Amino acid sequence: MSSLLTHIAISDGKVKRASLEVLSRCKELAGQHGHTAEAMIIDPDAAEYVDRIKEYGAEKVYLVEDPIFKNHINIPLLKALNSVITQANPYLVAFASTESTKDILGALAAKQDAAVLSDVSTFSLTDNGVEATRPVMAAKILSDTQAKGDQILVSVRSGSYDLIESPSDPEIITVDFNFEEHELKATLREVLGASGDKIDLSEAETIVAAGRGTKDDKGQALIEELADVLGAAIGASRALTEAGIMDPSLQIGQTGKVVSPQLYIAVGISGAIQHVAGMANSKVIVAINKDPDAPIFDIADYGIVGDLYKVLPPFIEELKKIKN
Amino acid sequence: MKFYVCIKQVPDVNAPIQIKEGQLLQDTDRMILNAYDASAVEEALKLTEDHGGEVEVVSVGPAKTTEAIRKALAMGADKAVHIETDGNRNFDSASYAEILAAFFEDKEYEVISCGKQSQDTDAGLTGGMLAEKLDLPYSTNAVGLDIENDKLIVKRQGDAGQEMIALPAPCLVTCSNDMNEPRIPSLKGIMQSKKKPVETIKLSSIGIDESTLEPQTQVTGYREKPARQAGEKFEGEPDELAKKVANLLDEEANAI
Ligand SMILES: Cc1cc2nc3c(=O)[nH]c(=O)nc-3n(C[C@H](O)[C@H](O)[C@H](O)COP(=O)(O)OP(=O)(O)OC[C@H]3O[C@@H](n4cnc5c(N)ncnc54)[C@H](O)[C@@H]3O)c2cc1C
Ligand SMILES: Nc1ncnc2c1ncn2[C@@H]1O[C@H](COP(=O)(O)O)[C@@H](O)[C@H]1O
């Protein structure tokens, strides 16, 4: 019997949904293979989140509490992960594939001498080790991948698994941790533009995504109005983040974020493969584009061929009516 | 500052791809410099132009890994090292990190710069692995770089905001293509690149025996991604289209 250990990411005082998806999957695998599902929380107030984790069946929860985890810094996070892993001695360590995870995963694998599969969309346990599916070639193709060894790390794309509630009464283990100033070889000077009250794109139910077609003030105002009516998060194509019109953290795609909302409305976006790589798993896709041959229409459930400046005002009005 | 930029030659994801019996059939004529590495080269060139220093590129790959090296030299890199593999093996990020770590062991530098991920596999692991093996302070997903005395100032894109991080040299950074627009090599750059030194070395010269380099992960096969069906595409009067689709979203798709 081995431990399947899920790292629980905290953002803006909340447990990330993507981490609970990973925990749900590990709990399911633990049940199938006779392993135990465990979780770790590394945060200044780690203990506060235990209640939330309990709903998803962790049998042990490791806590590392230190004020240094207020902001993401890779060196102390690696040290904490290392401490927990040494204590828990898990077979599998699973992460939600966030930017913070991407920052430490390679270094952690090298430190632990563990095999690692990053950004997977499915994973399971077999006699041969861990098998996973990874989207490759800008997510045009799926690769079946295998990792062998005594310890395996995986990071999982958000939206890959459903949440499965399975209440438990976990054993809580506080892991000793102290970090000296001099260990901090790199110094975090400042965090710019952390979006406090905005909706987290990777968890949003509805996303309005703006492309080059919306680059002027009028286009931007329409995007905001549309998002407002739907209570949607706003995302962007690279054309807009590159031009400095939209915040870089809103970029969706191969360089940006992977999202999987119930509804994705692409406005003035052509549908380049690198953009589609980040949004093709949306449940319902709407595209508004004046070019009838734009590739975005190949994957849209509902396509509106037309000038967004003419289509959006009546579209917003109609949605308002429906919403009331 | 002395910059080493690790560059990888990758298949062009825009080229047609076929899968036959689980294998990827790629058009091997369309190999390119990884887009994220092109940004890493560009930024190293800009910083050394402003602050002095040198840019050397390093690439691990079979004999035909010439395109990426040629491109980087034509952009303006000073010299190149090609660590040649026999090309019959599939390596993963950990294998490349091990090879690169062996190469860097006796080298002097201020910065090792990598791409944040390979454009074809999106693994995003090599940089962090290399930093750990060389015990270097590092940062990933950089969208801006600057030099301040002996420090590299990294603006990194985090989950929500951007983080400003000061790394003391020697250090390692991985670059996003959001960092800059890589220059297109000029004719002069291309001509000059032909005279630039390219050192080709064997794995054995850095103490690595290729036959015992065992990747920890393995691709067992490739599959087409189940295609999304294109739905309905509506053309006509904007007012009517807007109304129609809004109502379909409400009643048919239950999406609002
Ligand atoms: C390695 C790599 C990684 C990348 N990663 C990403 C990524 O993460 N995310 C990303 O988005 N891109 C990414 N890209 C860039 C990508 O290839 C495209 O360049 C980008 O997505 C284009 O953005 P766009 O669709 O907004 O602009 P365009 O391609 O210029 O399309 C604009 C569209 O708007 C339409 N339009 C214009 N005016 C109107 C109007 N008035 N009404 C209606 N429609 C209108 C046009 O018909 C056109 O289809 C990456 C590229 C590379 C090489
Ligand atoms: N064969 C290689 N030669 C040189 N650099 C490499 C090689 N493989 C990976 N890298 C570096 O690591 C980055 C990508 O890592 P990964 O996504 O793990 O493949 C690339 O952008 C390069 O900077």
Image (cartoon, coloured by chain):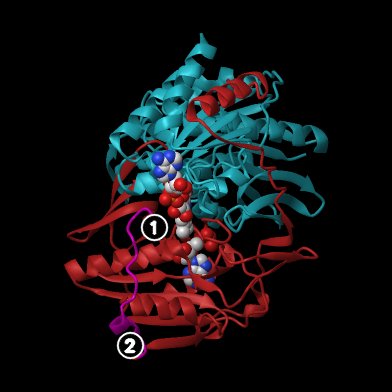
Chain colours: A cyan, B red
Mark 2 or 1: the one toward you: 2
A266 left or right of A167 in image = left
- What residue sits right under mark 2 in the picture? B191
The amino acid type, in three-letter code, at marker 2 is Met
Q: Quadrant of residue B40?
A: bottom left
- What residue sits right under mark 1 in the picture? B175
Q: Secondary structure at mark 1?
A: strand
Q: Secondary structure at mark 2?
A: helix
The amino acid type, in three-letter code, at marker 1 is Cys
Q: Is residue B169 magenta?
A: no
Task: State yes or no: Cβ of the residue under disc 1 lies below 8 Å from any atom of ligand 2.
Answer: yes
Q: Residue at x 30, y 63 (%)?
A: B43
Image vertical order of residue B208 relative to residue A302, above or below = below
Image vertical order of residue A312 relative to residue A185, above or below = above
Question: Neighbour class for label 2 at 10 Å: few (<14), some, many (≥20)?
Answer: few
Give the magenta range. Answer: B178-194
B251 left or right of A267 in image = right
Does residue A154 show up? Answer: no
The quadrant the C terminus of chain B occupies is top right
| Residue A251: numbered disc | none
Question: Neighbour class for label 1 at 10 Å: few (<14), some, many (≥20)?
Answer: many
Image vertical order of residue B173 relative to residue B253, above or below = below
Q: Residue at x 61, y 64 (%)?
A: B92
Marks 2/1 same chain: yes
Q: Position of residue B53 (x, y in %)?
A: 23, 73
Q: Position of residue A10 (x, y in %)?
A: 48, 29
Q: Is residue B180 magenta?
A: yes
* Nearest the eye: B30 or A222: A222
* Nearest the eye: A185 or A238: A238
